[in-house]
Amino acid sequence: MNQHVILGLWPIAGVTTVGVTRENAIATIHAAVDAGIRQFDTAYSYGLQGEADERLGAVLRELDPGLREEMHLIGKVGQRYDENGVRVNDGRPETLVVDAENSLRRIGIRCFDTLMLHCVDEEVPVEASAWALQRLVQRGMAKRVGLCNATEEQRAAFATVVPCEAIQCPLNGLQQDTLQTVIADANENQCDVWVYWTLMKGLLAGKISRDHVFAEGDSRPNYPIFQGEARQRAHDIVDQLTVLAADHKRSVANLSISWAVSQPGVTAALVGAHRPEQIADFANAGPLPKPLRREVNRIFATSNDSVAE
């Protein structure tokens, strides 16, 4: 069982990932289970019609009850699609309750192991959103709660209402700012820290070439790191990681994820996939031996002002 990796289900929703099929999505979740992954992250807004929830539920119904009991299911509420198909934040208490009820129904379960506020709604006090999540715990719809994409101040405000048991935030070797801010704060306050973008949308998986042309509808070219000099610098780093990974009989993806979960305060990494063959690259990722971590740090230091040892 790998407690350092969480399968993030955003890619299998098929909104920004091109070519996703329900068959492959379900096979991918099964492959993760078979590989020892027991933590799965979904959200009310993962899919225009809740595809991630539905596909997760389809797999859970096929599992042996004993195996099902090993699963840690993470849900997120407070983000949805408007009439134009744009994802928007809505942290109103009544919305969070409806989101949770619908997400649980789509999956076919009664309770999330962890339920999180997906994003802070700037129009709603975070304390009001926290109060709604506290009520959901009291109703038996979540065992514990947390929040994503929040500042240290927002986490603290949330925690005045209900204990913040976990946070989600970005972290990868190319983008390390959160190590000294939200991750350090969460660690001081005994929060689980689940990091995403550990492969930076596949860039740190080592499988996107310098001249790769993304398919129409793929959202990745819109990110600054996939543009111009920033992208070329990232490829320079990936070239070095490729050599190091081969020396240690690892994939670049495995090395990148393992680096992330080696950082102080990080509990586990959220990693996405939408095809079963992608699971093998990261299913056994875990904290790196210190000498190897230092080698990876030296490579990443070319794109960061400072790197944690």
Image (cartoon, rainbow, N blue to C red):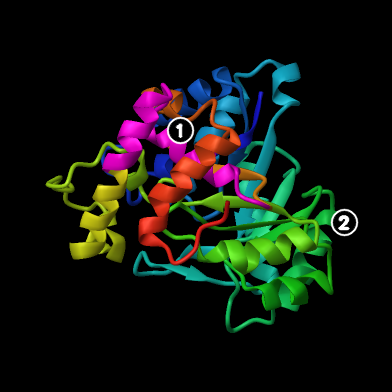
Residue 74, given in percent of the width and then of the height, sits at: 65, 45
Element assignment for label 2? helix
Asked whether 139 or 224 is in front, the reply is: 224
Instruction: Count numbered badges in the picture.
Output: 2
Rendered view: 25 above or below 126:
above
Asked whether 299 or 202 is in front, the reply is: 299
Residue topped by disc 2:
138
Element assignment for label 1? helix
Q: Main secondary structure of the magenta part?
A: helix
User: In the rendered view, does 176 fall on the left or right side of 132?
Assistant: left
Residue 177, given in percent of the width and then of the height, sits at: 51, 66
User: In the rendered view, does 241 fall on the left or right side of 27?
Assistant: left
Dot 1, how many residues are within 10 Å of its Cα: few (below 14), some (14-19), or many (20+)?
many
Rendering quarter of residue 20: top left
The reply to whether residue 34 is in sight is yes
Q: What residue is drawn where x is 19% and y is 42%?
A: 209
User: In the rendered view, does 264 fall on the left or right side of 208?
Assistant: right
Q: Amino acid at mark 2?
A: Gln
Residue 236, given in percent of the width and then of the height, sits at: 25, 49
Q: Amino acid at mark 1?
A: Asn
**What is the CA distance from the residue labelled 1 to the residue labelled 2?**
39 Å
Residue 228, given in percent of the width and then of the height, sits at: 18, 63
Q: What residue is drawn where x is 36% and y is 57%?
A: 302
The reply to whether residue 51 is in sight is no
Dot 2, how many residues are within 10 Å of its Cα: few (below 14), some (14-19), or many (20+)?
few
Identify the image quadrant of the N terminus. top right
Rendered view: 107 above or below 100:
above
Residue topped by disc 1:
254
In the rendered structure, does residue 249 fall within the stretch colored magenta?
Answer: yes
Q: Where are the magenta residues, as a range?
A: 239-264
Disc ID at residue 26: none
The single residue placed furthest to the right in the displayed view is 138
